[in-house]
Image (cartoon, grey):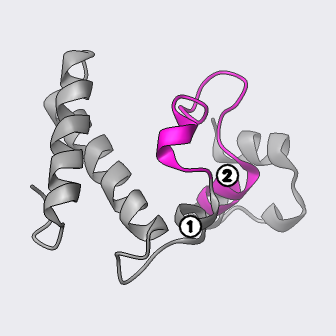
Amino acid sequence: MPQGAWSNKRERQYDHIKRSLRERGHSADEAEEIAARTVNKERARRGESKEASKTSTQDISSGRRGGLRSHKGPGGRTRDQLYEEAKRKGVVGRSKMNKAQLERAVGR
């Protein structure tokens, strides 16, 4: 397990997600990353972690989200998620951009 601070429940959740992703054809590294991110987000939503991002606590849960935000298809990422990526990339004028403009600015 990547984290020593996870409870037994979270370790079981991590193993289940990782195993499920491997069965669906994801690589081992990709399955581990997705499983760890999912568990950490659920910990943040439930107040089990010391730090939590705004999107971790206010976005829809990972279980509900499913493939809605898989970076493809009509759903894609939220404006807030695109804004945060634009902020990391240093995009000028990002605060006045709408979702479509942010998508173009971050290059996806």
Real-space Cα separation, disc 1 to disc 2, in angstroms: 17 Å
Q: Amino acid at mark 2?
A: Leu
Image coordinates of residue 28 in percent, x first then y, are: 14, 31
Image coordinates of residue 64 in percent, x first then y, are: 55, 39
Magenta stretch contains residue 38: no
Mark toward the viewer: 1 or 2: 1
Q: Nearer the viewer, residue 42 or 106?
A: 42
* Bounds of the magenta segment: 60-85
Picture residue at 32% right of the left edge, 54% below the top? 39
Q: Is residue 4 above or below residue 51?
A: above
Q: Is residue 3 above or below residue 108?
A: below
- Quadrant of the drawing holding the C terminus: top right
Q: Which quadrant holds residue 84?
A: bottom right
Q: Which residue is mark 2?
A: 82
Nearer-N-terminus badge (1/2): 1
Q: Which quadrant holds residue 25?
A: top left
Picture residue at 57% right of the left edge, 32% below the top? 71
Q: Which residue is mark 1?
A: 57
Q: As drawn, is 73 to the left or to the right of 7? A: right
Q: Secondary structure at mark 2?
A: helix
